[in-house]
Image: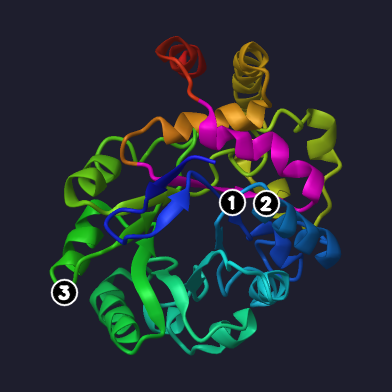
Amino acid sequence: MRTTELGRTGMEITRVGLGAWAIGGAEYDWGWGDQDDGDSIAAIHRALELGVNWIDTAAQYGFGHSEQVVGRAIAGVDPRPFVFTKGGQPEGPNRTTLQSLKRLSRLGLDSVDLYQIHWPIPDEEVEEGWSTLVELRDEGLARHIGVSNFSVEQLRRAQAIAAVETLQPQYSLLDRDAEPEILPFCEEEGIGVIVYSPMASGLLTGGMTRERIESLPNNDWRRRSERFREPQLSRNLELVERLKRVAARHGVSPGAVAVAWTLRNPAVDGAITGFRRPDQVEPIVVAADLELSDDDAAELESD
Protein backbone atom coordinates (compact mmCIF):
# COMPACT_ATOMS: atom_id res chain seq x y z
CA MET A 1 0.00 0.00 0.00
CA ARG A 2 1.31 3.41 -0.96
CA THR A 3 2.88 5.42 1.86
CA THR A 4 4.10 8.96 2.42
CA GLU A 5 5.79 10.92 5.19
CA LEU A 6 3.33 12.72 7.45
CA GLY A 7 4.55 16.29 7.19
CA ARG A 8 8.02 16.45 8.71
CA THR A 9 7.35 13.97 11.51
CA GLY A 10 9.44 11.19 9.99
CA MET A 11 6.45 8.85 10.28
CA GLU A 12 5.87 6.98 7.02
CA ILE A 13 2.11 6.43 6.94
CA THR A 14 -0.15 4.63 4.50
CA ARG A 15 -2.20 7.01 2.39
CA VAL A 16 -5.33 5.59 4.02
CA GLY A 17 -5.71 5.14 7.76
CA LEU A 18 -8.39 3.72 10.01
CA GLY A 19 -10.69 6.13 11.83
CA ALA A 20 -12.28 4.94 15.06
CA TRP A 21 -15.09 7.48 15.49
CA ALA A 22 -17.97 5.15 14.66
CA ILE A 23 -16.72 2.27 16.82
CA GLY A 24 -17.17 4.47 19.88
CA GLY A 25 -20.77 3.27 20.03
CA ALA A 26 -24.02 5.07 20.67
CA GLU A 27 -23.83 6.27 24.25
CA TYR A 28 -23.11 9.92 23.47
CA ASP A 29 -24.39 12.79 21.32
CA TRP A 30 -22.22 11.97 18.30
CA GLY A 31 -22.72 8.21 18.28
CA TRP A 32 -23.34 6.16 15.15
CA GLY A 33 -25.84 3.78 16.68
CA ASP A 34 -25.09 0.57 18.54
CA GLN A 35 -21.84 -1.15 17.54
CA ASP A 36 -20.54 -4.66 17.99
CA ASP A 37 -17.07 -4.49 19.55
CA GLY A 38 -16.16 -7.87 18.07
CA ASP A 39 -16.93 -6.58 14.57
CA SER A 40 -14.96 -3.41 15.28
CA ILE A 41 -11.89 -5.36 16.37
CA ALA A 42 -12.20 -7.66 13.35
CA ALA A 43 -12.36 -4.59 11.10
CA ILE A 44 -9.19 -3.18 12.65
CA HIS A 45 -7.39 -6.51 12.21
CA ARG A 46 -8.50 -6.72 8.57
CA ALA A 47 -7.22 -3.22 7.88
CA LEU A 48 -3.86 -4.08 9.41
CA GLU A 49 -3.70 -7.30 7.36
CA LEU A 50 -4.20 -5.24 4.20
CA GLY A 51 -1.32 -2.95 5.13
CA VAL A 52 -2.94 0.03 6.88
CA ASN A 53 -0.38 1.21 9.44
CA TRP A 54 -2.17 3.90 11.48
CA ILE A 55 -5.31 4.35 13.56
CA ASP A 56 -6.90 7.65 14.56
CA THR A 57 -9.20 7.81 17.58
CA ALA A 58 -10.20 10.30 20.28
CA ALA A 59 -11.13 10.37 23.95
CA GLN A 60 -14.49 11.89 22.95
CA TYR A 61 -15.58 8.93 20.81
CA GLY A 62 -17.91 7.10 23.14
CA PHE A 63 -16.24 8.88 26.08
CA GLY A 64 -13.27 6.57 25.88
CA HIS A 65 -14.94 3.45 24.48
CA SER A 66 -13.30 3.82 21.08
CA GLU A 67 -9.87 4.02 22.68
CA GLN A 68 -10.61 0.92 24.72
CA VAL A 69 -11.63 -1.03 21.60
CA VAL A 70 -8.53 0.14 19.73
CA GLY A 71 -6.38 -0.85 22.70
CA ARG A 72 -7.87 -4.35 22.71
CA ALA A 73 -7.41 -4.68 18.95
CA ILE A 74 -3.73 -3.76 18.90
CA ALA A 75 -2.69 -5.59 22.08
CA GLY A 76 0.12 -7.94 21.12
CA VAL A 77 0.17 -6.81 17.48
CA ASP A 78 3.72 -6.67 16.12
CA PRO A 79 4.62 -4.40 14.51
CA ARG A 80 2.20 -2.09 16.24
CA PRO A 81 0.46 0.44 14.02
CA PHE A 82 0.93 4.14 14.64
CA VAL A 83 -1.72 5.32 17.11
CA PHE A 84 -3.06 8.87 16.90
CA THR A 85 -5.56 10.22 19.40
CA LYS A 86 -7.23 13.49 20.33
CA GLY A 87 -8.23 14.83 23.69
CA GLY A 88 -11.47 16.21 25.04
CA GLN A 89 -14.97 16.92 23.79
CA PRO A 90 -15.95 19.39 21.07
CA GLU A 91 -17.88 21.63 23.45
CA GLY A 92 -15.17 21.66 26.11
CA PRO A 93 -12.35 24.18 26.59
CA ASN A 94 -8.83 23.23 25.68
CA ARG A 95 -8.00 22.61 29.30
CA THR A 96 -10.73 19.97 29.28
CA THR A 97 -9.20 18.55 26.13
CA LEU A 98 -6.04 18.03 28.11
CA GLN A 99 -7.61 17.02 31.40
CA SER A 100 -5.70 13.78 32.03
CA LEU A 101 -3.74 10.94 30.47
CA LYS A 102 -6.30 8.24 31.24
CA ARG A 103 -6.70 7.91 27.47
CA LEU A 104 -3.23 6.38 27.32
CA SER A 105 -4.15 3.71 29.82
CA ARG A 106 -7.28 2.97 27.81
CA LEU A 107 -5.10 2.40 24.78
CA GLY A 108 -2.69 0.29 26.80
CA LEU A 109 0.23 2.52 25.79
CA ASP A 110 2.87 4.48 27.63
CA SER A 111 2.90 7.08 24.87
CA VAL A 112 1.05 7.83 21.66
CA ASP A 113 2.59 8.54 18.27
CA LEU A 114 0.50 11.66 17.70
CA TYR A 115 -1.58 13.60 20.20
CA GLN A 116 -3.92 16.30 18.89
CA ILE A 117 -6.15 19.07 20.20
CA HIS A 118 -9.58 17.96 19.03
CA TRP A 119 -11.27 21.36 18.72
CA PRO A 120 -9.95 24.92 19.30
CA ILE A 121 -12.73 25.75 21.75
CA PRO A 122 -12.74 28.25 23.32
CA ASP A 123 -10.61 30.23 20.91
CA GLU A 124 -9.02 32.35 23.64
CA GLU A 125 -7.44 29.24 25.19
CA VAL A 126 -5.67 27.99 22.04
CA GLU A 127 -2.27 29.17 23.29
CA GLU A 128 -2.75 27.53 26.69
CA GLY A 129 -3.86 24.27 25.13
CA TRP A 130 -1.02 24.14 22.65
CA SER A 131 1.57 24.96 25.31
CA THR A 132 0.28 21.98 27.30
CA LEU A 133 0.70 19.66 24.32
CA VAL A 134 4.29 20.84 23.94
CA GLU A 135 4.85 19.89 27.58
CA LEU A 136 3.35 16.44 26.99
CA ARG A 137 5.74 15.89 24.10
CA ASP A 138 8.68 17.07 26.16
CA GLU A 139 7.67 14.59 28.88
CA GLY A 140 7.67 11.75 26.37
CA LEU A 141 3.93 11.07 26.57
CA ALA A 142 3.48 11.90 22.88
CA ARG A 143 6.05 11.47 20.12
CA HIS A 144 4.43 14.14 17.97
CA ILE A 145 1.73 16.76 18.48
CA GLY A 146 -0.85 18.33 16.21
CA VAL A 147 -4.24 19.96 16.02
CA SER A 148 -7.64 19.37 14.48
CA ASN A 149 -10.20 21.81 13.08
CA PHE A 150 -7.89 24.84 13.36
CA SER A 151 -8.11 27.88 11.09
CA VAL A 152 -5.02 29.45 9.53
CA GLU A 153 -5.16 32.23 12.10
CA GLN A 154 -5.22 29.68 14.94
CA LEU A 155 -2.40 27.72 13.33
CA ARG A 156 -0.29 30.89 13.19
CA ARG A 157 -0.90 31.55 16.88
CA ALA A 158 0.11 28.01 17.79
CA GLN A 159 3.16 28.19 15.52
CA ALA A 160 4.36 31.23 17.46
CA ILE A 161 4.76 28.92 20.48
CA ALA A 162 6.05 25.75 18.79
CA ALA A 163 5.85 24.18 15.36
CA VAL A 164 2.52 22.51 14.60
CA GLU A 165 3.44 19.10 13.22
CA THR A 166 0.05 18.01 11.87
CA LEU A 167 -3.45 19.23 11.13
CA GLN A 168 -6.64 17.20 10.85
CA PRO A 169 -9.32 19.09 8.88
CA GLN A 170 -12.63 17.91 7.50
CA TYR A 171 -12.31 17.51 3.73
CA SER A 172 -14.44 15.83 1.09
CA LEU A 173 -16.25 16.55 -2.14
CA LEU A 174 -19.04 17.92 0.05
CA ASP A 175 -16.83 19.96 2.35
CA ARG A 176 -14.09 21.89 0.58
CA ASP A 177 -13.71 24.76 3.03
CA ALA A 178 -10.08 23.81 3.69
CA GLU A 179 -9.03 24.29 0.06
CA PRO A 180 -8.62 28.06 -0.33
CA GLU A 181 -6.38 28.82 2.67
CA ILE A 182 -5.84 25.99 5.15
CA LEU A 183 -4.39 23.31 2.87
CA PRO A 184 -2.05 25.70 0.98
CA PHE A 185 -0.82 27.09 4.33
CA CYS A 186 -0.06 23.58 5.59
CA GLU A 187 1.79 22.69 2.39
CA GLU A 188 3.87 25.86 2.64
CA GLU A 189 4.67 25.34 6.32
CA GLY A 190 5.40 21.62 6.05
CA ILE A 191 2.49 20.70 8.32
CA GLY A 192 1.33 17.13 7.79
CA VAL A 193 -2.36 16.77 6.89
CA ILE A 194 -4.67 13.84 7.54
CA VAL A 195 -8.23 14.61 6.48
CA TYR A 196 -11.33 13.28 8.18
CA SER A 197 -14.75 12.35 6.77
CA PRO A 198 -13.51 11.99 3.15
CA MET A 199 -16.67 9.95 2.45
CA ALA A 200 -18.86 12.53 4.22
CA SER A 201 -19.75 10.18 7.08
CA GLY A 202 -20.87 7.40 4.77
CA LEU A 203 -22.94 9.52 2.41
CA LEU A 204 -20.45 9.10 -0.45
CA THR A 205 -19.91 5.34 -0.13
CA GLY A 206 -22.57 4.52 -2.69
CA GLY A 207 -24.49 2.46 -0.18
CA MET A 208 -26.42 5.31 1.44
CA THR A 209 -29.91 5.37 -0.09
CA ARG A 210 -32.95 7.37 0.97
CA GLU A 211 -34.39 4.20 2.44
CA ARG A 212 -31.28 3.49 4.48
CA ILE A 213 -31.18 7.04 5.75
CA GLU A 214 -34.81 6.77 6.86
CA SER A 215 -33.99 3.57 8.72
CA LEU A 216 -31.02 4.99 10.65
CA PRO A 217 -31.55 4.45 14.40
CA ASN A 218 -32.43 7.41 16.58
CA ASN A 219 -29.05 7.19 18.32
CA ASP A 220 -27.18 7.77 15.05
CA TRP A 221 -26.17 11.45 14.86
CA ARG A 222 -26.60 11.48 11.09
CA ARG A 223 -30.38 11.58 11.51
CA ARG A 224 -29.90 15.16 12.70
CA SER A 225 -27.51 16.19 9.93
CA GLU A 226 -28.83 18.56 7.25
CA ARG A 227 -26.53 16.83 4.77
CA PHE A 228 -28.71 13.72 5.07
CA ARG A 229 -31.97 15.66 4.69
CA GLU A 230 -33.67 17.73 2.02
CA PRO A 231 -32.98 20.02 0.32
CA GLN A 232 -29.31 18.98 0.51
CA LEU A 233 -29.90 15.25 0.16
CA SER A 234 -31.02 15.24 -3.49
CA ARG A 235 -27.99 17.25 -4.56
CA ASN A 236 -25.68 15.00 -2.57
CA LEU A 237 -27.14 11.84 -4.08
CA GLU A 238 -26.54 13.31 -7.56
CA LEU A 239 -22.86 13.48 -6.63
CA VAL A 240 -23.01 9.83 -5.57
CA GLU A 241 -24.21 8.93 -9.07
CA ARG A 242 -21.14 10.68 -10.53
CA LEU A 243 -18.95 8.77 -8.07
CA LYS A 244 -20.52 5.53 -9.26
CA ARG A 245 -19.74 6.33 -12.90
CA VAL A 246 -16.09 7.09 -12.15
CA ALA A 247 -15.85 4.03 -9.91
CA ALA A 248 -17.18 1.78 -12.67
CA ARG A 249 -14.43 2.98 -15.02
CA HIS A 250 -11.75 2.10 -12.46
CA GLY A 251 -13.35 -1.10 -11.19
CA VAL A 252 -13.51 0.15 -7.59
CA SER A 253 -16.15 1.29 -5.10
CA PRO A 254 -17.64 4.81 -5.08
CA GLY A 255 -16.26 5.27 -1.57
CA ALA A 256 -12.73 4.55 -2.76
CA VAL A 257 -13.13 7.21 -5.45
CA ALA A 258 -14.34 9.75 -2.85
CA VAL A 259 -11.29 9.04 -0.69
CA ALA A 260 -8.88 9.09 -3.64
CA TRP A 261 -10.23 12.50 -4.67
CA THR A 262 -9.08 13.98 -1.33
CA LEU A 263 -5.64 12.44 -1.80
CA ARG A 264 -5.20 14.30 -5.10
CA ASN A 265 -4.61 17.50 -3.15
CA PRO A 266 -0.82 17.88 -2.77
CA ALA A 267 -1.18 19.08 0.82
CA VAL A 268 -2.96 15.90 1.94
CA ASP A 269 -0.78 13.09 3.27
CA GLY A 270 -3.48 10.67 4.37
CA ALA A 271 -7.22 10.16 4.66
CA ILE A 272 -9.05 8.79 7.70
CA THR A 273 -11.60 6.12 6.78
CA GLY A 274 -13.97 4.49 9.24
CA PHE A 275 -14.89 0.80 9.29
CA ARG A 276 -17.24 -1.06 11.60
CA ARG A 277 -17.09 -4.50 9.98
CA PRO A 278 -14.23 -6.36 8.27
CA ASP A 279 -16.11 -6.61 4.95
CA GLN A 280 -16.15 -2.80 4.69
CA VAL A 281 -12.38 -2.46 4.66
CA GLU A 282 -11.03 -3.78 1.36
CA PRO A 283 -13.40 -1.85 -0.95
CA ILE A 284 -12.17 1.43 0.58
CA VAL A 285 -8.46 0.99 1.33
CA VAL A 286 -7.73 0.50 -2.39
CA ALA A 287 -8.03 4.30 -2.51
CA ALA A 288 -4.43 4.47 -1.27
CA ASP A 289 -3.23 3.31 -4.69
CA LEU A 290 -6.00 4.77 -6.87
CA GLU A 291 -4.94 7.52 -9.25
CA LEU A 292 -7.80 9.63 -10.58
CA SER A 293 -7.35 11.53 -13.82
CA ASP A 294 -8.03 15.22 -14.32
CA ASP A 295 -11.12 14.21 -16.30
CA ASP A 296 -12.31 12.07 -13.39
CA ALA A 297 -11.89 14.97 -11.03
CA ALA A 298 -13.66 17.39 -13.36
CA GLU A 299 -16.63 15.06 -13.59
CA LEU A 300 -16.82 14.70 -9.83
CA GLU A 301 -16.56 18.43 -9.23
CA SER A 302 -19.14 19.44 -11.84
CA ASP A 303 -22.47 20.80 -10.62
Dot 2, how many residues are within 10 Å of its Cα: few (below 14), some (14-19), or many (20+)? many
Amino acid type at mark 2: Ala
Q: How many marks?
A: 3
Residue that carries the numbered disc 3 in the rendered image = 161
Left or right of 268 on screen, residue 223: right
Left or right of 177 on screen, residue 64: right
Q: Nearer the viewer, residue 255 or 172?
A: 255
Give me the residue at 50% from left, 76% from top.
88
Amino acid type at mark 1: Val
Left or right of 271 on screen, residue 28: right
Dot 1, how many residues are within 10 Å of its Cα: few (below 14), some (14-19), or many (20+)? many
Residue that carries the numbered disc 2 in the rendered image = 47
Bounds of the magenta span?
A: 268-290
Dot 3, how many residues are within 10 Å of its Cα: few (below 14), some (14-19), or many (20+)? few
Give me the residue at 48% from left, 24% from top.
291
Residue that carries the numbered disc 1 in the rendered image = 52
Amino acid type at mark 3: Ile
Q: Is residue 259 visible?
A: no
